[in-house]
Every structure is written in structure tokens, then in C-alpha cells.
Image (cartoon, helix red, strand yellow):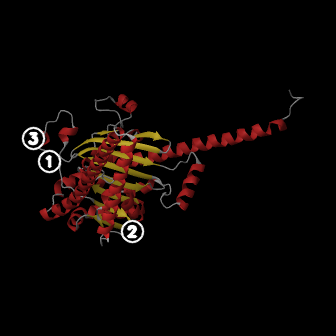
Amino acid sequence: MHERYSLSDFKTEGYIGIVLLIIVVIHIIGTRANRAKAKSWAKAHAGILQREFALVGFGGRKALSAADAEGAGLARTLAGGELESPEKILKERSLNTFVAYGTGRQNVAFVDVDITLLKRYNPLLIFAEYATSFFFDSMPAPAEKMDAILYPFDGKEALTVPGMLPGAHELRGSTKSAYDNFVWAVVNKDSMKTLRDERYDVSITTTKDHVKLPVWATVMSESAEITEMLLTPELITAVEQAGELFDYLIITDQPINRPTSLAETAPKKRIYLSMRLPASDEGYQATTPLFSYFLSLPDKLVEKAHFRPEVARKVKATREDMVKKLQKADEDEKAEERALEREKLKKQKRDAELKGLDAKSQKKYLEKEKERELKKSMKKGNVKA
């Protein structure tokens, strides 16, 4: 072999091997970097989630031992009350997305958290996403962010908690978890236009700057009274601390997408929080106060979000307008279907009549039909004139 071949004969294979090695190394480094980034988020927020929820993780409802909890993906707690493995609250959905989950709290059914990171394992994809966002406004630039959705009970514990009868949560002395319907948001102005274009719920609000907020943030609300109630000093301070990492906080009872049926107009309470991730672990000191406030927000809503009849009527009117539009669209669609059915029956009757006639009678029938159509069109022309 050494007499027939030399190393120079394997240059192509060598180059391919080097390229593959580089790709594998980049993939491994990028994947580890993303997991380290997700772990940093978990370390900064695991304690908050543990304090607010009885169950954090994805291990189910049954009582587990410490070893079982770790194997099932639940965060294990030390004797001092701190989490031994904070990263256990996360589940890796893909190489750049991680999810967290918490349940077991008064006024809250559960919370979902999505962590989206850069695709560090594939620099070409990152470059393509940045290039696409540069040329197309509809494509946002890639960013590392956290999106959390909190699902309030809104008085429907009996539909969510197994074994709980209607009204049982009140009999046990807890407060009723329902609050009024409304849409309200504090948003970073950089995200304002995108939110209004992509989300139906915030599109029904009015945007207005508030003197207490930083100049880069604004309020989207259905009523000034709602804003005065929700824009607390705690929230203002938390937003200011988060700074440019803050994206939006939305409290809503309406769907994200424009309703297309009456069933979709039924109120469904949700609270959304979106923030960009800081570049370093120290940056979480600025964002964790807002995340903590977000988790406790349902308690404040249950306590205070019960507005005067005038405000409630204004909010209700917006929803009734959408219901009326959908009802009209439904009636128009049904009327069109009835008209098409009448035309279909009329055509079937005409075809049956023609089929029973001989050639001469068919010709006479068609001539009369043509005359009727001509008279009808002339009559329409005279009416328009």
C-alpha cells in the first residue's frame, strides 16, 4: 500500500475530516454553552418558583422520595430549604429551548416558562436568521429570552383540581379567585408595534405613556382606572430595574388570535411575561424582582381587580362589539349558503324540465329563458339609472 499510495492522495478525505471535526466541536461547545445558560437561569429563579409553587418540575402528582424526585426531573430540596439541583426544574425541549413548570398555588392553576437561546451549535443558522431579520421587517432578530404564561384559576378550581366540588375552595376559607375581565399591558416601546399587529387582545387597548414609567416603556389599557390600579410602585420599580431586558407584561382575558367563532370569544384569563436574558449571571439580579412580582400578580388581581360598573360596562362593550360582528358574519354566511342551495334546487328543477322536453320544445324553453334574463338585466339597468 505504501508503494502505491502516499498521504497526498488523501488530501480530499483529510479536508472533509477536518471540516467534520470542526462541525462536531462547534456543536458540542454550542450545546454545552446553551445548557450552561439555561442552568444559570434555573439557579437564579429556582428559589422563587419553589417559594411560590408546591410542585416545580415535570414529575407528576404523587409523593416522591428524594432519589425518585431527582430521577423524575423534580428539584430536590436540601434540609436548609435550598434546591440541591436548580437545573432540575428545567426540561430540554431542543438544543436551544428549555421549559419549566410550576403548580400548586392559591389563585393559580399553573405556570409555563419557555427559555429560548441562540443556536450556538450552528453558527450558520444564526447568521441566516440575522440576515433574514435585516432584510425583512416581519422577521425579528434572534434573541435569548424568557416567555412565561401564568394561568389563573379565575374561580374555576372545581374544573381544574381533582376531587374539588364547586364552592369547596370558599368553604375551606380561601378567597374566591375570580376577578373582572380586562386587557392591560406594560410594554417596551420596541415591542409595541409588533404586539399590536400580532396579538388581537392588545389591539383592543389604547396606548398611552405614563409619567411614572421610564421613557422607553408605555401602557396599553382599556381604561385609565385600570391603569391606576395596576401600575403599582412595586411594578414600576421592577420594570425600571429590568431596564431594556424587559419586553412586556400582559394581563388579558381575550385570545391572542382574532376570534373567528363565538366560542373563541369566551374569556380566558392569562398573564404573560417576556424578558430578554442578560449576558451574565449578575444580570439576573435586575430581572428576578419582576419575575417574582409576575408570579404574585394573581393575588393582587383577586384582591383589587373589581372595578366600578362604568368601567365594567366599557370593557364589556368592546367584547360585545366583537360578538355582534361574529354573529353578523355567521348570519351572512348562512344566508349565502341558503341562496346557493336555492340556486342549486332551481338548476336541478330546470335541468329536469329540459330533460323531459323534445328538441323543439327545449329550443323554445331556452329562448324564453334568454328573454327573461334580458328583461331582468334591462330592468336592473333602469333602476340604477
Q: CA distance from mark 1 to mark 2?
A: 36 Å
Q: Are marks 1 and 3 in contact (CB under 8 Å)?
A: no
Q: Write down the residue under mark 1.
A: 176
Q: Which amino acid, mark 3?
A: Leu
Q: Which amino acid, mark 1?
A: Lys
Of labels 1 and 3, earlier in sequence is 3
Tell me if residue 183 comes above or below residue 359 in the rendering: below
Q: Which of the two residues, 36 or 124, is positioned nearer the viewer here?
A: 124
Q: Is 70 on the left or on the right of 293, as rendered?
A: right
- Residue at 38 percent across and 60 percent down: it is 197
For the C terminus, the image quarter is bottom left
Dividing the picture into quadrants, the one containing residue 228 is: bottom left
- Residue at 26 percent across and 51 percent down: it is 335
Residue 191 seen from this side: yes
Point out residue 105 in the picture as x, y percentages from the top left corner: 24, 43
Point out residue 147 in the picture as x, y percentages from the top left corner: 38, 51
Q: Which of the two residues, 160 or 299, is positioned nearer the viewer here?
A: 160
- Which residue in the rendered view is the most extreme toward the right? 3
Q: Write down the residue under mark 2.
A: 216
Of labels 1 and 2, earlier in sequence is 1
Q: CA distance from mark 1 to mark 3?
A: 10 Å
